[in-house]
Every structure is written in C-alpha cells, then in structure tokens.
Amino acid sequence: MSCLLNFAVAMGILFVTGLIGYWIGGQASAQKVGVLQEQLRQAEEQKSETEAVLMELRTEAQTATLRYEQLQDDVEEQVPEGPMQELVTLIRKQLEEGMDAERLAFAIRSARPPRNCTEPETRRFVISTPAYKGSESKVEIAEAGLVIKGSGASAKNEKGDPEAWYDPAKAVEISFKAKGAEEVVKNSVMPIRHSVVVGDREYRLSVEEAARSFAKVTFDSCDYP
C-alpha cells in the first residue's frame, strides 16, 4: 500500500511538473511570437519610411533633371552660335583692345545689307613654301588694284622630308595689298576672309584650300557705303 502511494505521489509530481513546463513553454512561445510580431511591425515601418525617402529622392532627382534641362535650353538660347558667335567674339576683342564702345556701336548701326553686288569670281594661285622653286604666284584684281599672295609650311612625305607644296592643315600667311593702301597680312588656317574698300566699292574675299599647291580666292564687290 505504501508503495502504491509513493508511486501515485511521484506520478502526480511528474504530471504537475509537466503542466508547469508546458505552461512556461507556452508563455515563452507567446512572448517570442510577440517579439517577432514587433520586429515585423518595425521592419514594415522602416520599409515604409525607406520607400517614402526613395520616392522623395526620386522626385528631387526628376526635378533637378528638369531644371538642368531648362538651364541648358536657356544657355543655348542665350549663347550665340555660328556667325553671331563670331560677331560677339569680334566685338569683345575690339573692346578689349581699347576701341571706344560708342564708336563701335555707331559703326554697327551704320552697317547695311550689301547692294549692287557683282557675281562671285574665283581665281587660284600657288602658296609658296621653303621648298618651292617656282616663280612667284599671285592673284591680281585689276579694277581694285588689289594683289593677293601667300606662303605656308611645306608638307612632308613619309620620310619626313619637305615637299614643294604647302600643308593645308597648318596656318598660312596671306597678304592683301590694295593700291594706295598698306599691306594687310593674315596668318591662319584656311579659310581666311578679308574685305577691303577701294573707292566706292567694297571687295569681299575668301581664301580657301584648292588642288595641291594651290589656294583659291573667291571674291565679289558691292556698293560702298
């Protein structure tokens, strides 16, 4: 009888211990689930905040891109190109060299479209070089008393030896001498443009590369002023 009683007590203790362990395990699991749920909630909040920040950054980036494109368009509209750019550069250069601004403005206002112009003519001449052994070559415009000639650097062959003809990729020196006027010399890569007034006519000239050894000058004349 005593043995049965002891056995029953032991089983009761084991049962109670099991219940307590089960309860404690359940509490721990519930607590763990709560922790995981809280972590999930925080992660979702952080995700939402991150998405909001990304959206804001994306919006700011799009705004910055649009602003940049607008500024680029504004700059392209304000910065001149082609002939206008050349004209602005020339005006700036004249002012930097000390030309009176009012005088320059008067000259620009006094300018007018060309009138009574002749048809363009083209003539060619040899650009002399250090290796050129031929006679002097030049273009003469008789009615203007204008003489045009030029010189340049020799082109080089595969061995590096100088040739008789000039190198059109390098600057050439072109001189313009009108009767009764001082000689004007321009040193630049072609094309080279120049104008000269003789009497009541303005001669407009453009010197460009032609066949090997040659340059061509195209010119016309218009009423002046």
Image: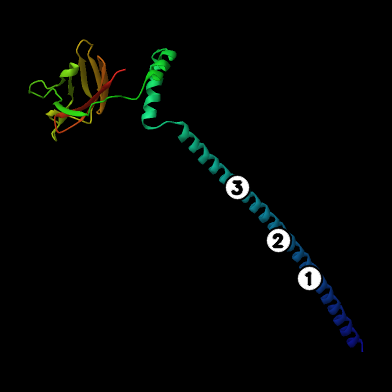
Is disc 1 placed on a helix, strand or loop?
A: helix
Query: Closer to the camera: disc 1 or disc 3?
Result: 3
Separation of residues labelled 1 and 2 (CA atoms) = 22 Å
On the rendered image, what quadrant is the C terminus found in? top left
Q: Residue furthest top?
A: 180
Separation of residues labelled 3 and 2 (CA atoms) = 28 Å
Q: Residues within 10 Å of mark 1 (few under 14, many from 20)?
A: few
Separation of residues labelled 1 and 3 (CA atoms) = 50 Å
Disc 3: which residue: 59
Q: Is residue 225 above or below residue 76?
A: above
Q: Residue furthest bottom?
A: 1
On the rendered image, what quadrant is the N terminus found in? bottom right
Q: Residue at x 34, y 25 (%)?
A: 113
Residue 13 found in image quarter: bottom right
Q: Is residue 213 above or below residue 149?
A: below
Drawn side of residue 143 relative to residue 3, left or right: left
Asked if the residues shown at circle 3 and circle 2 are in contact, with their CB atoms under 8 angstroms apart, the answer is: no
Asked if the residues shown at circle 1 and circle 3 are in contact, with their CB atoms under 8 angstroms apart, the answer is: no
Q: Residue at x 84, y 76 (%)?
A: 19
Residue 129 found in image quarter: top left
